[in-house]
């Protein structure tokens, strides 16, 4: 008599597929539509909208790793910023060494950026593996201790970065071929923002496909529902969850590269500076929701650019006001995770 270790058909049924809620998407479109008469000029509106969406895609890449870890592992990792900073600084080293090659233009510039991204993801993922084993593993299920110990880990990580790269801000310029903008009438669409949007869309599609269409995604989601049952079938859920943490750290490293190129400079505090924005996005979207994180990041990016143009003095508080308004409408976020 032979036995198999396939996940039974009953496991996917434990994760019901509700009808898609379009209201948050309509909210995103409504923000864009309401901004049009406020901005006044169609060319300015188009420029601000593309810039806001690009910023949203970058923020999503950064936040997706954290929302993935929390949604699947129930870990509040306030040390996420150290992976962002490490990825950004690793990219400065790689791109500095390939500067002459990248400035030849065309595919050479893209290759240099992708090499920097790959190096950042590998190093950030390796640090994530060590971070999970040494810092996070002893405090699984203890949220308060997770907050304290991961914040301590981020502070230590920032000091190590200062030792290696120095405490000062480092320039991270774009290759020559990615500077400038395409002109559509009077609207200027920056080349790098288009690249950032494409990469962000690819990351979102890959995450959704992996979690919903692959065996690994099925096992991870089933492990969240009933860990003991999946382990009894012969699968090592702990290893899968460690892989999730490493993947989340690698995404943070990728996001650090994208944010550094967006600002064209990096500093050891870059991760801590972005952390507030990340948590606003995650809270808006619904804790642990990848789709909610995506829509929330786009909303935050659009709001930051529109208010920065229309009312610069309140731009710093616009995203907090957006978070408050959405939580008053939906206290659990745009797409709350209900399968905990």
Image (cartoon, rainbow, N blue to C red):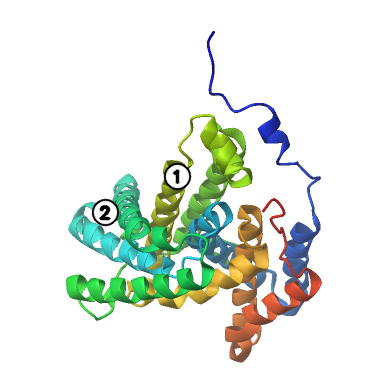
Residue 237 visible to the viewer: yes
Question: Reading the chain from its start, which is encountered first: label 2 or label 1?
Answer: 2
Q: Is residue 71 above or below residue 326?
A: above
Q: Looking at the image, how many numbered discs can be counted on the residues? A: 2
Q: Which residue is mark 1?
A: 238
Looking at the picture, tell me which residue is in the foreground, 304 or 223.
Answer: 223
Q: Is residue 283 above or below residue 200?
A: below
Query: In the orientation shown, which residue stands out farthest toward the bottom?
Result: 313
Q: Report which quarter residue 97 is drawn in.
A: bottom left
- Callout 1: helix, strand or loop? helix
Q: Which residue is mark 2?
A: 102
The residue under the point 44% across, 60% down is 192
Quadrant into which the N terminus falls: top right
* Crowdedness near tag 1: few (<14), some (14–19) or many (≥20) residues, C-alpha within 10 Å: some
The percent position of residue 129, horizontal first and vertical second, equals 34, 53
Looking at the picture, tell me which residue is in the foreground, 218 or 309.
Answer: 218
The percent position of residue 308, horizontal first and vertical second, equals 59, 81
Closer to the eye: label 2 or 1: 1
The residue under the point 44% across, 63% down is 139
Looking at the picture, tell me which residue is in the foreground, 38 or 57.
Answer: 57
* Crowdedness near tag 2: few (<14), some (14–19) or many (≥20) residues, C-alpha within 10 Å: many
236 with respect to 93 (left or right): right
Q: Is residue 296 above or below residue 16?
A: below
């Amino acid at each position: 008599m032979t036995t198999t270790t396939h996940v039974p058909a009953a496991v996917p049924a434990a994760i019901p597929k509700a009808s898609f809620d379009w209201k948050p998407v309509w909210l995103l479109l409504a923000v864009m539509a309401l901004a049009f008469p406020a901005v006044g000029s169609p060319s300015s509106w188009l420029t601000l909208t593309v810039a806001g969406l690009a910023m949203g895609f970058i923020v999503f890449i950064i936040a997706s790793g954290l929302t993935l870890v929390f949604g699947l592992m129930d870990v509040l990792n306030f040390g996420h910023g150290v992976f962002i900073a490490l990825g950004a600084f690793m990219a400065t080293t790689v791109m500095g060494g390939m500067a002459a090659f990248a400035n030849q233009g065309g595919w050479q510039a893209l290759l240099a950026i992708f090499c920097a991204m790959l190096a950042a993801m590998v190093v950030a993922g390796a640090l994530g593996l060590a971070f999970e084993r040494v810092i996070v593993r002893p405090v699984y299920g203890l949220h308060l201790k997770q907050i304290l110990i991961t914040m301590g880990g981020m502070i230590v990580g920032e000091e190590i970065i200062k030792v290696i790269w120095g405490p000062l801000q480092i320039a991270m310029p774009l290759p020559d071929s990615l500077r400038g903008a395409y002109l559509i009438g009077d609207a200027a669409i920056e080349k790098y923002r288009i690249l950032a949007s494409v990469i962000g869309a690819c990351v979102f599609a890959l995450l959704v496909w992996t979690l919903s269409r692959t065996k690994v995604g099925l096992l991870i989601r089933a492990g969240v529902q009933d860990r003991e049952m999946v382990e009894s079938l012969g699968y090592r859920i702990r290893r899968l969850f460690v892989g999730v943490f490493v993947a989340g750290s690698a995404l943070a490293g990728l996001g650090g590269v994208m944010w550094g190129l967006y600002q064209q400079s990096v500093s050891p505090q870059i991760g801590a500076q972005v952390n507030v924005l990340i948590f606003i996005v995650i809270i808006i979207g619904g804790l642990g929701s990848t789709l909610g994180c995506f829509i929330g990041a786009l909303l935050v990016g659009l709001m930051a650019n529109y208010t920065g143009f229309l009312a610069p003095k309140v731009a710093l508080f616009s995203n907090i006001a957006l978070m408050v308004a959405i939580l008053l409408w939906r206290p659990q976020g745009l797409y709350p995770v209900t399968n905990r």
